Image (cartoon, rainbow, N blue to C red):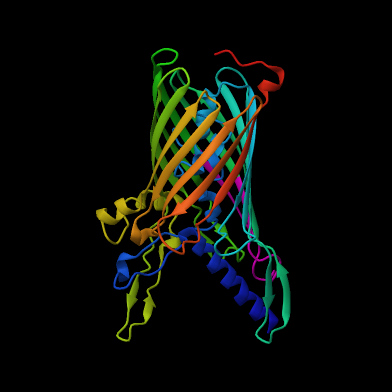
Amino acid sequence: MNRFINARVILIIFSVYLSLAAVGQTLPTGQEVRYNPISTAVPFLTITPDSRHGAMGDVGVATSPDANSQYLNPSKYAFTEEKFGFSMSYTPWLRELVNDINLAYLAGYYRIDNNQVIGSSLRYFSMGDITLTGQDQTNLGTVSPSEFAFDVSYSRKLSDNFSGGVTLRYIRSDLSGGIGAETYTAGSAFSTDVSFYYINKWGGTGDSKSIAAGINFSNIGSKISYDQGSTKEFLPANLRLGSTFTTEIDEYNSFSISMDFNKLLVPTPSTHYTVDANGGLIVLPDNTSNQSLISSIFSSFSDAPGGFKEELQEFTISTGAEYWYNKQFALRAGYFNEAQNKGNRKFFTAGVGVKMNIAAIDFSYVIPVQRNNPLANTIRFTLLFDIDSFSGRRKDQ
């Protein structure tokens, strides 16, 4: 009996967790098949972990490089000016729902020579403590579901204006906390990222300008299973591409504007929602999880039931702006938009940054468009450290 209850509880936890990938979703009256969001396993991999880019609407594939480039586009590391740097970020997540879900992020890089840089990061996602009870109100114990991802990247300049990078990642997801271990286990998977970055600068000191572009294919890897391989779920394989324009207004003031497009490279669910004669919700079956990795990536551009129009709706759009005064104080703002029938996440972001001699502090805040949105009041904190500044030296380029 307890084994049955445990298994059922684990399924509930898993279902609720996957729903976080489509935070704030509801089924709009009368939309039926048109409402078709994409869900994957380990959606924490899609959460922007640092404050700078979180304050700019989650853009970042083509912004200026910093210690947090590992997540958005590690090939940017090749254009860093410092020898070594790292950052620490902390995000209390979904505070409108619960008070103990958190994302912690540690990232850093080391320059091997003028052309080569290695980077690494660790993401840890804690879903807090959950007390489980059986049908007879028997206490089954407390579980603490958690996940982490560890990765290492290598980036290299391919020319004076162009760089490329590759990342290897290990992912572990423990949703059961040991409950129902006979059937449900922690899932693990491996993935890779492939990224590129281009930047062109012109003008002199106090009047320089630049245009940058980037692309990152991330989380391309094996499926993950929580029931010893009986059921396998897709990782959130993703295509991110975008551009950034930066201008120095004068010697003390600079401004940049960015735009990113994101698309999950996984099958669009064939699951459809419809309503019966009595107004009840009917869920039709989904058979997309049996596709292979390569097949799912290519088919993700043409498998939407609504055709080309729905395929375009699967792109999320991020826009962001950043203003720097004297390279020490930053103001940031942005907007994130997702189609209504693909999740309907729409929010403004804002943040500030202060750069000191050896460290920088960033803060960001989410302002949702919808009422009662679980992302409301989401904040992020980031500390960045420039190790070169300890010795007062910089790399010559």
Give x and y (percent) for residue 250: 42, 18
Q: Quadrant of the C terminus?
A: top right
The residue drawn where x is 65% and y is 70% is 183
Q: Is residue 49 above or below residue 242?
A: below
Q: Is residue 339 above or below residue 177?
A: above
- Between 219 and 295, the residue placed more toward the observer is 219
Q: Is residue 307 above or below residue 218?
A: below
- Between 253 and 56, the residue placed more toward the observer is 253
Q: Is residue 258 left or right of residue 75?
A: left
Residue 245's quadrant in the figure? top left
Q: Is residue 395 left or right of residue 193?
A: right
Give x and y (percent) for residue 126: 65, 56
Looking at the rendering, the stretch of residues picked out in magenta corresponds to 170-193
The residue drawn where x is 55% and y is 19% is 115
- Between 224 and 157, the residue placed more toward the observer is 157
Q: Quadrant of the N terminus?
A: bottom right
